[in-house]
């Protein structure tokens, strides 16, 4: 292995000694072999400092784009953030550049010949605003104020805006478009977007492994897929018979379990993904949910016949089932501390079971329950009812602590979890609304709309199933178009709100002062939107193609037809 690394180092040093352009004086004719091989050789040689220097060298990045290798450049960044130690001083810079590049890669690729400065323009407009202190003025102050976690400009370490400012000073001045505001979705929100190979299948379940770097997805076609979320690769594909109804992993990450609509239950060892347990139930026993005990080496499955079946993970044998529900058992939750299991059922009860005796110790009568979870110390049980209420139950006293309606009919809770060392219950709805219930004050706090980051709009993606990352900072949402989106739920900050045309927007223009935006849509409306008041006015209605632009003094909007002939001028001061 050492010899292999030695040869990679030799090759990396060889390419580092070569010019990026064959015509260095005029920066023409990129050295294609250098552009292709240098980052790969540096990665294989574990030369993290030189790899960082290459990937933050604008001349190298532009040369690779001009050489027609923009998509390969994205792969270089993906490989770098998955291979480079996270403790490296430049790892965060590389990750943000990758995020920005991924966001605009199609635009950069399509304009590599006629507009090579597209790369710099896109990276500037995304990255300069990421951690520049000027960004603060464009965002709403979150509950609790700004801190190092939710404000990149307050975080320690190198700042990417200083890097792109250096690029701007060092490069030749060529015309490019600069954004006067941050993007509505800041960098660092969307880690990636995966698409399944079979677009007929939609994602039915998602769950993170405890290592935080792997995500498991289950589909309605019976595929169970393991993803590496940092280099966007599929690690493993397993198959189970039928629609994946339940997906879970053990607290230590050793076991992965899935159950499906045809009655099959499979437990894999995540070391080599060998099957540890494989069992098929009868038609009337179809499994609906699967859960691993954090403290005991067992796995439980909730079934259609109301029985909760349990397996010993070491022997693979069944142990006495929990019998007591009169109708279908739906959801399960193990206590993190005590030998206790909670289950929900169509019989309108939540049962709390003592695993040592096999009997239930409490029955809570409720309407249909869709989600439940224990607090990290095992003292509280939270569950969400279809009627729109969240109930907190004290397991020790056997009494309800609170029962509170959720704030809004659209908040159908898809997933919820108690936060570590706090009395806060974090929830995310099927429509992408994140909110937190403070159990002590009985108030909902820190509500945030994530729907735009999840692309949940107009029913395009509906009813996602959602899983929290191990650190509770991110969620993975499996959507009904065969897409998984992973977003950082703590750093998603809403920017200014732009109104929606009924139909797609054809063209836009921004005033020199940056306070007005004009837009024309397929709905025929020409609108002017004020970024200061968040209001708009419709100034013209036409179905024909038009062009428009603001005067330099910010007083007029000039409108032209498709032949560039003047149609009319709108006085922005007089509103006519």
Image (cartoon, rainbow, N blue to C red):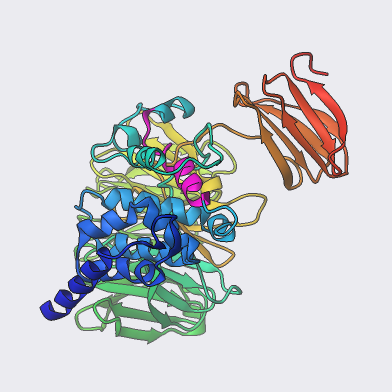
In the rendered structure, does residue 277 fall within the stretch colored magenta?
no
Give the left or right position of residue 458, taking residue 199 as reference: right
Q: Is residue 525 above or below residue 23?
A: above
Q: Nearer the viewer, residue 242 or 144?
A: 144
Residue 573: where, in percent of width, then height?
74, 14
Q: In this view, which residue lies farthest toward the top?
A: 574
Per the picture, the main secondary structure of the magenta-coloured stretch is helix
In the rendered structure, does residue 128 fall within the stretch colored magenta?
yes
Quarter of the view holding residue 142: top left
**How many marks do you count on the picture?**
0
Q: Is residue 278 visible?
A: yes
Give the left or right position of residue 560, taking residue 180 as reference: right
Q: Quadrant of the N terminus?
A: bottom left
Q: Nearer the viewer, residue 83 or 128?
A: 128
Q: Is residue 553 above or below residue 562?
A: above
Quarter of the view holding residue 336: bottom left
Give the left or right position of residue 378, taking residue 349 as reference: left
Q: Quadrant of the C terminus?
A: top right
Residue at horizontal 31%, vertical 48%? 93
Q: Nearer the viewer, residue 46 or 344?
A: 46
Residue at horizontal 72%, vertical 42%? 507
- Highlighted magenta segment, given as a residue range: 117-133
Residue at horizontal 41%, vertical 38%? 128
Residue 202: where, in percent of width, then height?
56, 69
Residue 168: where, in percent of width, then height?
41, 39
Residue 51: where, in percent of width, then height?
26, 60
Q: In this view, which residue lies farthest toward the left?
A: 2
Q: Is residue 290 visible?
A: no
Q: Nearer the viewer, residue 168 or 276?
A: 168
Quarter of the view holding residue 354: bottom left
Q: Is residue 402 above or below residue 515?
A: below
């Amino acid at each position: 292995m050492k010899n292999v690394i030695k040869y990679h180092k030799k090759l990396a040093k060889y390419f580092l000694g070569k010019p990026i352009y064959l015509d260095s004086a005029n920066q023409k004719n990129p050295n294609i072999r250098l552009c292709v091989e240098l980052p790969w050789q540096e990665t294989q040689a574990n030369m993290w400092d030189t790899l960082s220097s290459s990937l933050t060298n604008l001349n190298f990045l532009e040369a690779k784009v001009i050489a027609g290798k923009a998509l390969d450049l994205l792969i270089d960044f993906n490989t770098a953030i998955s291979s480079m130690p996270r403790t490296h001083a430049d790892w965060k810079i590389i990750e943000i550049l990758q995020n920005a590049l991924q966001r605009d890669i199609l635009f950069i690729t399509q304009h590599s010949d006629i507009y090579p400065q597209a790369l710099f323009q896109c990276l500037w407009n995304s990255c300069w605003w990421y951690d520049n202190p000027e960004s603060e003025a464009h965002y709403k102050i979150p509950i609790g104020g700004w801190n190092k976690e939710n404000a990149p400009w307050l975080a320690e370490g190198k700042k990417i805006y200083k890097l792109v400012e250096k690029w701007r000073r060092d490069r030749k001045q060529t015309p490019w478009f600069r954004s006067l505001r941050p993007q509505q979705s800041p960098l660092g929100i969307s880690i990636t977007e995966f698409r399944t190979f079979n677009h007929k299948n939609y994602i039915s379940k998602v769950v993170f492994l405890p290592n935080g770097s792997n995500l498991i997805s289950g589909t309605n076609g019976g595929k169970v897929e393991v993803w590496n979320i940092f280099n966007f690769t599929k690690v493993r594909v397993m198959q189970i018979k039928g629609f994946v109804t339940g997906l879970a992993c053990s607290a230590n990450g050793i076991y992965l379990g899935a159950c499906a609509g045809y009655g099959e239950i499979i437990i894999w060892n995540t070391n080599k993904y060998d099957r540890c347990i494989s069992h098929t139930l009868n038609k009337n026993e179809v499994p609906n949910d699967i859960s691993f005990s954090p403290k005991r080496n067992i796995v439980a499955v909730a079934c259609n016949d109301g029985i909760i079946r349990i397996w010993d993970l070491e022997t693979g044998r069944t142990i006495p089932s929990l019998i007591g529900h009169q109708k279908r058992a739906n959801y399960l939750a193990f206590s993190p501390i005590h030998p206790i299991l909670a289950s929900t059922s169509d019989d309108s009860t939540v049962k709390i079971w003592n695993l040592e005796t096999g009997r239930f110790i409490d029955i809570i009568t409720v309407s249909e329950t869709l989600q439940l979870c224990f607090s990290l110390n095992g003292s509280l049980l939270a569950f969400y009812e279809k009627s729109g209420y969240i109930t907190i139950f004290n397991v020790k006293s056997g009494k309800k602590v609170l029962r509170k309606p959720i704030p809004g009919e659209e908040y159908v809770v898809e997933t919820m979890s108690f936060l570590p060392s706090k009395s806060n219950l974090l929830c995310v709805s099927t429509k992408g609304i994140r909110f937190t219930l403070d159990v002590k004050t009985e108030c909902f706090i820190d509500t945030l709309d994530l729907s735009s980051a999840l692309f949940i709009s107009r029913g395009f993606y509906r009813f996602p199933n959602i899983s929290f990352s191990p650190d509770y900072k991110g969620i993975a949402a499996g959507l009904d178009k065969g897409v998984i989106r992973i977003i950082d739920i703590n750093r998603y900050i809403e920017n200014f709100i732009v109104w929606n045309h009924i139909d797609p927007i054809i063209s836009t223009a921004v005033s020199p002062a940056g306070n007005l935006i004009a837009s024309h849509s397929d709905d025929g409306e020409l609108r002017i939107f004020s970024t200061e008041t968040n209001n708009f006015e419709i100034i013209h209605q036409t179905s024909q193609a038009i062009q428009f632009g603001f005067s330099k003094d910010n007083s007029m909007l000039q409108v032209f037809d498709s032949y560039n002939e003047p149609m009319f001028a709108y006085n922005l001061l007089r509103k006519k």
